[in-house]
Image (tube, rainbow, N blue to C red):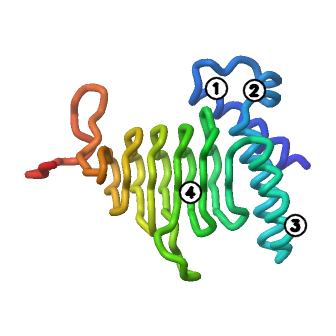
Amino acid sequence: MIKLVKMIREDLANAKTHDPAARGDLENALVYSGLHAIWLHRGCHALWNRGLKGPARILAQINRALTGIEIHPGAKIGRRFFIDHGMGIVIGETTEIGDGVMLYHGVTLGGQVLTQTKRHPTIEDNVTIGAGAKILGPVVIGEGSAVGANAVVTKDVPAHHIAMGIPAKNRPRLKEENEPLVDPGNYKI
């Protein structure tokens, strides 16, 4: 029970970090569909891992109906995961999401094949994915990267890069002082 309370407090603090509109913890706990979706997903995922796949899928569909966010119970999601304006998000079964990841509305973390393999993306730590982005297949989005709004990503994104466009092209992500996080070398897009 203490672990659950600690996790909820961490999620509420994370909401304040990622959303300037976030007010108090009670209001956020009551009105943030992204928080509701991840909390319900954690229960679904626990059932899935215990072999209770039918009940996990049923609870996941209830989660989808309540929040507009579809997360397969098999998806692995780390700590401090935040969904802002979550309507229309789809997260597939073999998706792996690291810590400190933020998604905006309309994001799809989907597959491209119908085989029982690793077919969904791996999102490493501290990644931001913009509204409407589609990340398809078993690609890796590197640590500290970002995916622009409406981008379609079908290839890996290196750490500390930003992927933009259709199809997405990568470029080094810059610090606020316009210093590259990584040496861009002769990189061109």
- Residue at the disc numbered 3: 55
Residue placed most toward the observer, 28 or 181: 28
Residue 63's x, y, as percent? 79, 49
SS assignment at label 2: helix
Tell which circle, 3 or 1, labels the residue nearer the N-terminal end. 1
Total numbered labels: 4
Residue 162 can be seen in this image: yes
Residue 161's x, y, as percent? 31, 47
Q: Amino acid at mark 2?
A: Asn
Whether label 1 touches label 2, CB < 8 Å: yes
Q: Distance between the Cα atoms at labels 3 and 1? A: 32 Å
Looking at the image, the residue that sits furthest to the left is 186
Tell which circle, 1 or 2, labels the residue nearer the N-terminal end. 1
- Residue at the disc numbered 2: 28
Whether label 2 touches label 4, CB < 8 Å: no
Q: Amino acid at mark 4?
A: Ile
Q: Is residue 51 above or below residue 168?
A: below
Tell which circle, 4 or 1, labels the residue nearer the N-terminal end. 1
- Residue at the disc numbered 1: 16
Q: Distance between the Cα atoms at labels 2 and 3? A: 28 Å
- Residue at the disc numbered 4: 97
Q: Distance between the Cα atoms at labels 2 and 4? A: 23 Å
Whether label 2 touches label 3, CB < 8 Å: no
Q: Amino acid at mark 3?
A: Pro
SS assignment at label 4: strand
116 on left or right of 48? left
Q: Nearer the viewer, mark 3 or mark 4?
A: 3
Q: Residues within 10 Å of mark 1 (few under 14, many from 20)?
A: some
Q: Amino acid at mark 1?
A: Lys
Q: Distance between the Cα atoms at labels 3 and 4? A: 23 Å
Tell which circle, 2 or 3, labels the residue nearer the N-terminal end. 2
